[in-house]
Amino acid sequence: MGRRCNEDYDYLFKVMFTGDSSVGKSNIISRLTRNYFSHQCKPTVGVEFGIYTIQDKGKTIAAQIWDTCGLERYASFTKSCYRGVAGAVLVYDITRRRTFENVGKWLKELRDHANSNPVIMLIGNKSDLQHLRSVSTEDAQKFAEKEGLLFMETSAFKSTNVDKALQIILQEIHRVFS
Ligand code: GDP
Ligand code: MG
């Protein structure tokens, strides 16, 4: 599953971000790959890539990050998009309950299309907006447990838990696929 490479890393894994629009996927990715946050709300056009690396058990593990594919796009594209995915991050917005309710739909699409058995992490983003919270941590945790997903709450805005989340999913991917 992980491609072996002789240059800057020992393993390269494809990690996909999905979830409703405006939940913060692009900002989480730009935090990870460029340490950049944008207040602008602009829809992602096409697939954006970024590379993120961690050290794990003496190896350099790189994630090739794919932003948003699925549902809203053409079926043939969706299929190729999910091909070879080692990990998937399903993002919802803790202030918009609807985005959490839609996680099941994203999960189904992922499980229908991914030809591998990817490691999946559920992320509740915008944890800085506690006063607007409409999804409790407990509800999300329960859902994640039931579905066998890793779980974390993040804030791309405050940079909270963003690196930690990627470290955790990449360590698990490394464990599972190497
Ligand atoms: P995407 O459609 O899922 O890629 O969402 P974006 O990354 O484009 O973010 C949508 C909007 O939410 C933008 O206005 C961002 O500035 C905002 N946003 C993203 N992450 C956070 C966060 O952690 N906290 C807050 N307060 N706003 C965020
Ligand atoms: Mg986006």
Image (cartoon, rainbow, N blue to C red):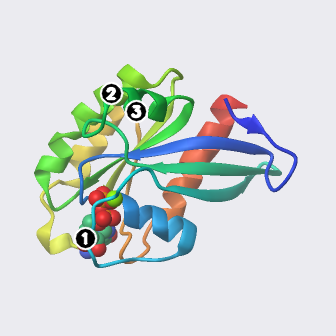
Q: Kindly tell me whether mark 1's CB lies below 8 Å from ligand 1.
A: yes
Neighbor class of circle 2 (other Cα within 10 Å; few <14, some 14-19, many 20+) is: few
- Of labels 3 and 1, the one closer to you: 3
Asked if labels 3 and 2 touch by Cβ distance under 8 angstroms, the answer is yes
Real-space Cα separation, disc 3 to disc 1, in angstroms: 24 Å
Which mark is on residue 157?
Answer: none
What residue would you read off at disc 1? 41
How far across and down, in percent of the image, does residue 137 sit?
25, 53
Q: Which quadrant of the structure image shows residue 144?
A: top left
Query: Helix, strand, or loop for circle 3?
Result: helix
Q: CA distance from mark 2 to mark 1?
A: 26 Å
Q: Nearer the viewer, residue 159 or 30?
A: 30
Q: Which residue is mark 2?
A: 75
- How packed mark 1 is, by other alpha carbons closer than 10 Å (few <14, some 14-19, many 20 or more), is few
Residue sitting at 75 percent across and 43 percent down?
Answer: 11
Counting from the top left corner in percent of width and height, residue 145 is at: 35, 34
In-front residue for pair 116/40: 40
Amino acid found under the numbered disc labelled 1: Cys
How far apart in space, not on screen, are marks 2 and 3 (Cα)?
5 Å
Residue 9: give x, y in percent of width and height.
79, 52
Please, what secondary structure does the residue beneath circle 2 have? helix
Task: Answer with the quarter of the image where residue 128 lies.
Answer: bottom left
* Residue denoted by label 3: 77
Question: Which callout, 2 or 1, points to the residue nearer the camera?
Answer: 2
Q: Residue at x 27, y 67 (%)?
A: 42
Residues under numbered marks 2 and 1 in contact, where contact means CB atoms less than 8 Å apart? no
Residue 116 relative to residue 126: left or right: right
